[in-house]
């Protein structure tokens, strides 16, 4: 995992920083005059400022604002969270850190959600007291549910400690400082090198001031697109933690034609009655492993969870 982060970080750095400058320098034509009209040049300048401004806001929001918001949310849950008793259903040791005597573990907890529907949820964290064996299968632990399901996390352990990783925060600050320095350096260097008393009329779309930002923007947008693909999973988690359960009748099960890593997406169409007695028909799509494809139920009944404010939104917590 660490290798992949380093690899993609280096890949992004190359195509966003030296690559646009190299392409520009290699194809640069010597000219001492303006390349564009004043209006076009200032249009390019405005475009570049918009691109770099968006990139800066994105990284500051991702690296700092969201982190502080999540910390505040956890503090709020510790003060106002709804207590639940949870049972450890599954335990897996991922890694042991001998220097700190900590375990990286993955567990599955079973507990009532905000509507008192018993759910199961998987979580990974570092156990700072492995000698106490608090998370062995069958043990009871206390959790706190977030009463506001529009914010993550949806629940925490009641004795969870909140803090920042100092080295991680330093790296984030260094990254933002270097990014700002790079942007200022781009504008300053090329303005002094190419303006020739014509202002910003040397700008073109392929100029590093714009093209470097454009390449970075592509990576940012791709990242946001990938995160957007997982937004549906967040909606499902909201239903899991705040929804109600119901027994649904399977009307049809079919493949949508969409595959991810050769794994098909299956669409379930079900009918069910909500807690008010109103009947609904809803669909649910899920990527299913080829190994589990034969276990997908095709008829009969199945337990679902639904959003009581919008019963068309459902999830199937236990398909297999």
Image: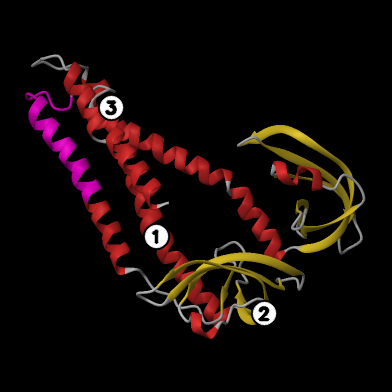
Q: Secondary structure at mark 2?
A: strand
Residue at image coords 80%, 48%: 295
Is residue 229 shown above or below 107? above
Residue ID for mark 3:
44
Nearer to us: label 2 or label 1:
2
Residue ID for mark 1:
65
Measured from the top left, where is residue 147 in percent x and y?
Answer: 63, 72
Dot label at residue 84: 2
Measured from the top left, where is residue 128 in percent x and y?
Answer: 45, 78
Q: Secondary structure at mark 1?
A: helix
Q: Secondary structure at mark 3?
A: helix
Segment tinted magenta in the rendering: 178-200
Nearer to us: label 1 or label 3:
1
163 to the left or right of 140 = left
Query: Mark 2 or mark 1: which comes first in sequence?
Result: 1
Is residue 283 shown above or below 152? above
- Residue 46 shows in the view: no
Magenta-highlighted stretch: main secondary structure? helix
Residue at the bottom extreme, as displayed? 132
Closer to us: 271 or 56:
271
Q: Are marks 3 and 2 in contact (CB under 8 Å)?
A: no
- Residue 216 shows in the view: yes
Measured from the top left, where is residue 81 in percent x and y?
Answer: 59, 78
Closer to us: 151 or 94:
94
């Amino acid at each position: 995992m660490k290798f992949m982060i380093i690899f993609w970080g280096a890949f992004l750095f190359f195509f966003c920083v030296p690559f646009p400058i190299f392409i520009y320098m290699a194809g640069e034509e010597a000219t001492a005059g303006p390349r564009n009209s004043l209006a076009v040049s200032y249009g390019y300048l405005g475009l570049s400022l918009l691109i770099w401004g968006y990139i800066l806001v994105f990284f500051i929001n991702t690296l700092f604002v969201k982190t502080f918001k999540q910390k505040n949310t956890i503090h709020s849950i510790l003060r106002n969270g709804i207590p639940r008793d949870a049972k450890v259903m599954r335990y897996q040791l991922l890694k042991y850190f001998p220097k700190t005597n900590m375990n990286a573990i993955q567990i599955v907890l079973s507990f009532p959600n905000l509507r008192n529907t018993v759910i199961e949820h998987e979580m990974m964290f570092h156990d700072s007291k492995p000698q106490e064996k608090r998370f062995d299968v069958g043990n009871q632990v206390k959790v706190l549910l977030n009463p506001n399901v529009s914010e993550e996390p949806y629940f925490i352990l009641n004795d969870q400690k909140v803090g920042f990783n100092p080295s991680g925060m330093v790296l984030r600050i260094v990254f933002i400082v270097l990014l700002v320095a790079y942007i200022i350096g781009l504008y300053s260097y090329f303005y002094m090198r190419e303006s020739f008393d014509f202002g910003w009329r040397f700008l073109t779309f392929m100029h590093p001031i714009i093209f470097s930002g454009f390449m970075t923007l592509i990576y940012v947008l791709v990242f946001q697109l990938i995160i957007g693909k997982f937004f549906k999973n967040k909606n499902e988690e909201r239903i899991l933690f705040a929804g109600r359960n119901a027994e649904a009748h399977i009307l049809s099960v079919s493949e949508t034609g969409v595959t991810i890593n050769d794994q098909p997406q299956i669409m379930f169409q079900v009918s069910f009655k909500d807690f008010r007695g109103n009947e609904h028909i809803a669909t649910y799509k899920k990527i299913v492993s080829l190994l589990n494809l034969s276990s997908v139920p095709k008829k009969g009944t199945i337990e679902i969870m639904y959003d009581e404010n919008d019963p068309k939104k459902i999830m199937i917590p236990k398909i297999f």
